[in-house]
Amino acid sequence: MTRQRKIKQIILLGMVLAALVLGSGCAKKQVDSQPSDLQAETAGEQAGETAMEREAAEEEALSEAEEYRLRQAEAAQREAEAEEESREAMREIIYFAFDSYELSPEAREALKEKAEVLENNPGIDLLIEGHCDERGTEEYNLALGERRARAAYEYLVLLGISPDRLSIISFGEEKPLDPGHTEEAWDKNRRAQFRITD
Amino acid sequence: MILVFSLYPPFQGSRSFIDLDKPVYEVELVNFPQKKPTSKAEKIPAKAPEKPKADTGLKKQVQPRIPKAPPPVEIAQKKKKQPAALKKKEDKPRKAPSTQAPPTPEKVLASAMADIEKNAQPEKREEPETPDYLAQALSDIKQDVKQRGPENPGSSGTSTRESLYGGLVEARIKENWRFPGIDDTTPLSAKVELRINSEGKILETTILDSSGRPDFDRSVKKAIAETRILPRPYNQRLQKIVISFHSQEL
Amino acid sequence: MKKIIFFLCTTILALSPFLPAQAQEAMHINIYGPGQKKINLLVSQALALQESGPAPDEVRDVEQTLYKNMEFLPFINIMQPEDILGGTELDGVTGKDIDFKRFALSRADLLLTLGWVQEGAGSVRVELRAFETFSGKLLVGRGYVITKPYQTVEAVNRFCAELMQKLTGRNGFFRSTLAFVRKNDGHKEIWTSTPQGRSLKQITDFKQYCLSPAWNWKGTMLAGTLVGDKKHELIIWSKKDKRLRRIQLAGNTIISPAFHPDGRLFISIDRYGNPDIYSLNAEFEVEQTEVKNWAIDISPQFDRKGENMVFVSSRLGNPHIFLLDLRTRKVKRISYEGKYNTNPDISPDGRYIAYSRRTPDGHRIIVHDLKTNTERQVTHGPGNDEDPAWGPDSYFLAFSSNRTGEYRIYLATRQGDETKMIPTGPGEATAPSWNPAVGR
């Protein structure tokens, strides 16, 4: 992803430079008003000059417009990438140990990133889902799922996110990511998941 | 009583009906005259002080250590321990098996169940084969007793024979006694007197003490009626047997 | 001289316990417990009471239903016709026509007879009788006129309930209702059926996850948890008008609703950031805090008197079973073994607590006797046995188990008898709740 970006940036730069070079070749600075004594020059010359100036001005305007469009595109591109990064940060799942709702260091890191995204995007809210593996019993797993979601919730609040923007739901063992009956599957299912709501 | 236990044919299919009420320590019943139920001593009390685990409190009832039905020889060994064991019993409540750090109760039960299923006898075996098995076991015990001599030097060997015979009678009648085991909350008891002849044939049955429940009384009478003949009495003068039937296991 | 005689007599008396056994004439024996805790039952061949053609379907249905019902009872052993000397055909269905001795000799304890008469098109009269072979006594005798298909099951259930009452003093098994959860197409809905697995009815259709159905004591309402896409809701179903209500409560999580005998609903919600137990009023608003602390407290259940509440708490670090005396507010610990004990249910008579303990081999159902303070394991897997629910007679237990690979509902008994599956149709079945009201 970053490599592609660099290439794009280089291309963009190249285009900008090219535009500048082309522009500087033809583009004049603002057409100054001529001093009066030079108005004696032939109309033809004047006309010719004006035509050239107009052309130059047009070209300048064109390349400026293009530059502007390019800059817009780049900005949009960056925005889209940033948004995708944010979404990724939000989508990231945090995992828990068996029968536990303690946040691991990885979980805390992930939550920090989420907090950042939330800060930068004041318009969005977050729904925190708590999940368990199948090994316990249904009702206790609903409670454990709630504790896991709440652990994430409390950490986010600690990081400065307003509780109004956060909500919790426990799915207990009802929605496993992996329906298998192995340690691997269970590891994947003991989690908190995050959904953007607005 | 080991003999009694292995005769029971309550095993229906692969999901065996395990009677978890059956006590492990029935052996004692055979060898000492029944003066009164010893159940009080056997009941595992809650919060028994000798439980070594950190969180005291509840003593669960025997995750039943249903023993493998051992061959009759083992009875001898157990008998040896009897006098000491009995004393212990009277002094303090029996130590719960769970304090001996056994394998998980689940495993014990599973292995015991497997053993029992191996040893399980089909229903038909009840009728003709039983006396042979009993006789075999009986003769083994008799032999064993002869070898070791009487236990209480004071009493004659008769008391042992009496106890043995009592055990045989109990086994035979119990085998034919069927009563739905749904209500174990109100214990029922009925006392019945049997008159027998020298061959062991039951001549007359009289209810001395009714249980108060006609269906229980009938079940008891039926058990005796179906038995019809008891093992030949060890003593020709034995003419009456009084049996107390209790709905509860020990 | 008198002195000598007196001395002799007392000596003899004193010595008499030591006199050789020849003088003994009676012996005393104790028998503790029957050799077989099942009685042998024989269902005789159906008999036409009047000249007629072949037996109509209703009669076949009655026979089948009778067999199926009896199979559920752990204290009944159904005999095979081959076990009966002289076969199972009868000359008549009443006592005077039956040679009971023949059946008693074959060790049959109970004899069921079925007589029928075709009374015009679409109407069959069926006579069911239960005899005790030992005495020839008629225990139950009933006649039923069947005009519609559903009536066969109803008739047999009533007969079996009476028979069970006669034999055991209880009749709840054949006249009560189960509620449970069934998973189909990835969703969980609440269903009801009889404890024999008949009259299956779907109650909810939210296409989400409906959990923890709970009957009220009159059998007129069901409560449950609806886990939707974004939140939990409490659902209340009214049997009378089939109405389903959805109610939101404070907090995010709704767990384990349960009705107290006085009609109040108890529930676990995380009002203050942690699942605690509250009681609600008739409008399902939070009325009183029942159990509140830093730990998870869930799964309340009550006995018929409503004096005791059993529940799960993680206050010791991991889930265990506790008993709350609702009057004194004293809490007593019930489970000591294992590290994960959940799903408690207290028997209607208040004496037994069944719960599910996680063992290295899977969850197992344990029954704790409050009177003797002892415990017994009543199921043995394999797989996981969870969620026990007492029947109205404090004898049967419904529970869910994945011993076959998929979760289904099974029946166990307080004494650990063999378990039987309750057929509930396709899809995993869990979370049984047994209506304590008898007679539906």
Image: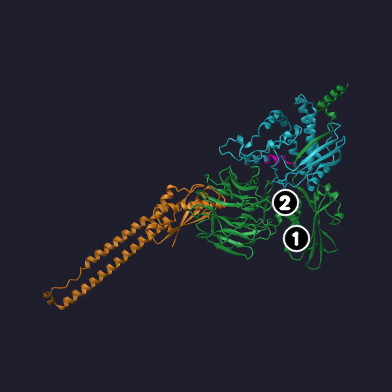
What residue type is disc 2 on?
Leu
Q: Which chain is green?
A: C
Magenta region, main secondary structure: helix
Q: Chain of mark 2?
A: C
Q: Is residue A151 above or below residue C19?
A: below
**Stretch in magenta:** B113-121
Q: Colour of chain B?
A: cyan
In the image, farthest residue toward the front: C2
- Frontmost residue, B161 versus C77: B161
Kindly identify which numbered label has been placed on residue C73.
2
The secondary structure type at the circle numbered 2 is loop
Q: Residue at x 29, y 65 (%)?
A: A67
Q: On the picture, is B10 further left or further right than C254? A: right
Q: Chain of mark 1?
A: C
As drawn, the chain in orange is: A
Quarter where residue C162 is shown? bottom right
Q: Is residue C183 magenta?
A: no
Magenta span includes B120: yes
Residue pointed to by mark 1: C155
Q: Could you tell me residue C372's position as x and y percent?
A: 66, 42
SS label for mark 1: helix
Query: Does B115 sit left or right of B126 as displayed?
Result: left
